[in-house]
Image: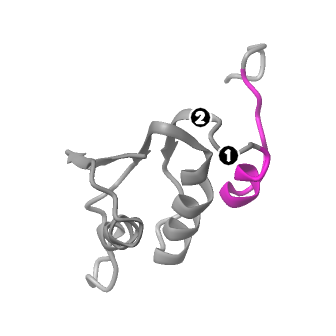
Amino acid sequence: KFSNFSNVQIHKRNSTEASKLFKDNYFDYIYIDAEHTYDAVISDINSWYPKLKKNGYLFGDDYYWREKDNSFSLQKAYQDFIREKDIKEWCVFKSQIIIKK
């Protein structure tokens, strides 16, 4: 869909590998909508968060998503990250989480 746009680069890599292509403090905002496992979510956030500029925003999809048996939710992964990094500014709107660096 975007391959003919000169201002778009397509990287066919997994999320963590793609994050290595960019220097830290590079992006104003990042949107993550990827694999729905605890380890994958934590890996994605930890890989991309350093790529944000100061006061940049990380957006995540499916905040309220959970396994049918309730054994795991994306909410837990985001909350663990927020606690670990002592993040003060974040909010959830519908199923989207926004974290300010």
Q: Secondary structure at mark 1?
A: loop
Q: Position of residue 70 (x, y in %)?
A: 26, 82
Q: Quadrant of residue 44?
A: bottom right
Give the residues drawn in magenta, as a range.
8-21
Query: Is 23 left or right of 36, judged from the image as shown?
Result: right
Quadrant location of the N terminus? top right
Tell me if residue 26 comes above or below residue 77 in the rendering: above
Amino acid type assigned to the residue bearing label 2 in the image: Phe
Q: Position of residue 29 (x, y in %)?
A: 50, 35
Tell me if residue 54 comes above or below residue 38 in the rendering: above
Q: Depth check: 42 or 62 in front?
A: 42
Q: Secondary structure at mark 2?
A: strand
Q: Quadrant of residue 11?
A: top right
Q: Position of residue 81 (x, y in %)?
A: 40, 68
Queried whether the magenta region covers residue 64, the answer comes back as: no
Query: Is 16 left or right of 46, judged from the image as shown?
Result: right
Amino acid type assigned to the residue bearing label 1 in the image: Asp
Q: Quadrant of residue 16?
A: bottom right
Determine the residue positioned at 36% across, 67% down: 74
Q: In the image, which disc is placed on residue 24?
A: 1
Determine the residue positioned at 79% across, 46% down: 21
Q: Which residue in the structure is indicated by mark 2?
A: 27
Tell me if residue 41 comes above or below residue 93 in the rendering: below
Query: Is 47 left or right of 79, judged from the image as shown?
Result: right
Query: Is 94 left or right of 54, judged from the image as shown?
Result: left
Q: Nearer the viewer, mark 2 or mark 1?
A: 1
- Report how far apart the C-alphas of labels 2 and 1 lie in the structure: 8 Å
Tell me if residue 44 comes above or below residue 97 in the rendering: below
